Image (cartoon, grey):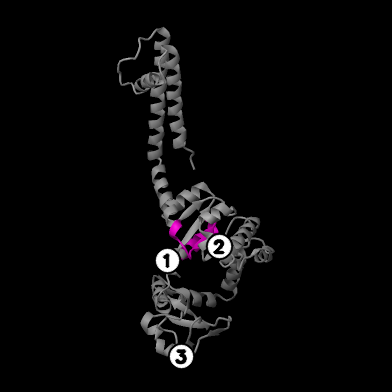
Amino acid sequence: MRQRPNTLYLLYLILFLILIGTVGYMSILDVGIVDALYMTVITVSTVGFREIENLDAGGKLFTMFIIFSGLGLVAYVFSQLAVFLAEGEFKRVLLNRRVQRRLQTMKDHYIICGAGQTSVSLIEQFTRSQAQFVIIERDSNRYEELLEQGYHVIHGDATDEEILSEAGIEKAKGLVSALGSDAENVFTVLTAREMNPNMQIVARAIDTTASQKLMKAGADNTINPNELGGNRMAVLMLRPQIISFLDAITKIGEQTLDLGEIEVTARSPLAGKMLRDAKIPEKTGLIVLATKENDGNTIYNPSSSTVLHEGLSMLVLGRQEQITELQRMAQPNSSDQM
């Protein structure tokens, strides 16, 4: 990111020039501070009012110095302002302030640490799922790119506690650490877990031995993209029909189907009903693939007599808007986004 002069820095330059002029005129003209300040201001601004006292040769030379210095400083300030506007920095400042205001009210959101190649699909999925999330990115060019695209993004190091706090980690629902090295991911997970013991943490493992370290640091789950990619390539080669089938059931024309996990709350109109009476496929178009109890016991292809009680989660397949509709039914007072 291009460095630009700070506004205070430009203000200090102007004040410094006025100070020099005031002290100079007090010495040359032997006048009080108010008269000397008056002389300096009318000289810097080149308004041409009458001098307080007649100037000798030294006073005239000093006045010319103040005039040229003032003109040069004004030209410099305007040139920086032109660059500020022309390079879009003014727009970036407004976007950054918008992000800061949004972060102050954001809660139950997700934090994505690192916006590299691994996170591209992750960000797209979160956007498609209408999830609230904020991105922490260290690379200046990538940060500006994401900011221009309208994402909530913070420029900084995700291993820094202050940056994580700025991202609202104390109020966050989950964190994904997808940084460029295992050491950075371990440190980020360790710091995040200490700052929010109850959040869900998923971390990227680059080396095959890193998963165990990340789990010890506090990650709930780890993902090795290289391993996943290798497994998929193997299945495509050895059992291509399986991948074709999975791709087919998650695509309907141009529509992409998503998996969603919906928990039934106490106030839900679904609570206490049997699955057949809830009529989820008829009302939402979703397919109920499985149910999961609080103890983690999962039943796939549940029977129609399964009772939907508080705390029971349903694994469903369908479009995102259908999943959102079922969430409103199961969690009528919840503001969480899938």
Measure the alpha-carbon separation of dots 1 and 2.
16 Å
How far apart marks 3 and 2 lie (CA) works out to 36 Å
Q: Secondary structure at mark 1?
A: loop
Residue that extends furthest to the bottom in the rendered view of this protein: 305
Q: Where in the figure is residue 53, as x and y percent of width and height?
A: 35, 11
Residue 288: assigned label: none
> Quick one: label 3, few (<14), some, or many (20+) residues within 10 Å?
few
Across and down, in percent, residue 334 comes to 43, 72
Q: Is residue 275 magenta?
A: no
Would residue 88 be seen by someone viewing this image from the given angle?
no
Say which label, 3 or 2, has the lower sequence index.
2
* Residue ID for mark 2: 176
Determine the residue positioned at 39% across, 86% down.
279
> Please, what is the three-letter code of the amino acid marked with disc 3?
Ser
**Residue range of the region highlighted in magenta in the rendering:** 103-125
Residue 110 inside the magenta-drawn segment: yes
Name of the residue lying farthest toward the front:
32
Q: Which residue is mark 3?
A: 304
Rate crowding at label 2 as few (under 14), some (14 to 19) or many (20 or more) other CA atoms within 10 Å.
Answer: many
Q: Is residue 275 visible?
A: yes
Percent across and percent down for residue 88 are 40, 43
Quarter that holds the C terminus? bottom left
Q: Which residue is mark 1?
A: 130
Q: Mark 1: which amino acid? A: Gln
Between residue 136 and residue 336, name the one nearer to us.
336
Decide which of tag 1 and tag 2 comes sooner along the chain: 1
Assign a secondary structure to mark 2: strand
